[in-house]
Image (spheres, rainbow, N blue to C red):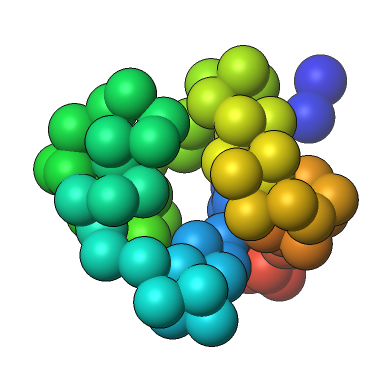
């Protein structure tokens, strides 16, 4: 069985949002979530559901892997 130690999901939402000149509120409104959800996502405090992750990628018109990266950190 694998442990979760050292694995994290990071995202590029801040960068993608800035490239398009969108505010956190605009992104939240387009996704149907709260601004607090976007803040938590951007600070990597919250991992989205698979559905929300795909919706974010569609919003920014990029592949899912361009938004989210799964990283391994050695202990």
Q: Position of residue 31 (x, y in %)?
A: 41, 31
Q: Is residue 26 left or right of residue 13?
A: left
Q: Position of residue 13 (x, y in %)?
A: 50, 62
| Residue 52, quarter of picture | top right
Number of numbered tags placed on the structure image: 0
Q: In the image shown, does 69 or 75 lie closer to the viewer? A: 69
Q: Position of residue 46 (x, y in %)?
A: 36, 40
| Residue 2, quarter of picture | top right
- Report the residue at 36% width, 67% height from top: 22
Q: Is residue 44 left or right of residue 40?
A: right
Residue 27 seen = yes
Q: In the image shown, does 68 or 72 lie closer to the viewer? A: 68
- Report the residue at 64% width, 22% height from top: 50
Q: In the image shown, does 27 or 51 lie closer to the viewer? A: 27
- Report the residue at 54% width, 81% height from top: 19
Q: Does residue 52 lie above or below 41 as drawn?
A: above
Q: In the image shown, does 37 or 24 lie closer to the viewer? A: 24
Q: Quadrant of the N terminus?
A: top right
Q: Quadrant of the C terminus?
A: bottom right
């Amino acid at each position: 069985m694998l442990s979760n130690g050292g694995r994290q999901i990071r995202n590029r939402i801040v960068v993608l949002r800035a490239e398009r000149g969108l505010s956190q509120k605009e992104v939240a409104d387009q996704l149907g979530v709260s601004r607090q959800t976007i803040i938590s996502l951007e600070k990597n405090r919250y991992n989205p559901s698979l559905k929300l992750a795909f919706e974010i990628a569609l919003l920014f018109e990029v592949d899912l892997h361009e938004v989210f990266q799964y990283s391994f950190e050695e202990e």
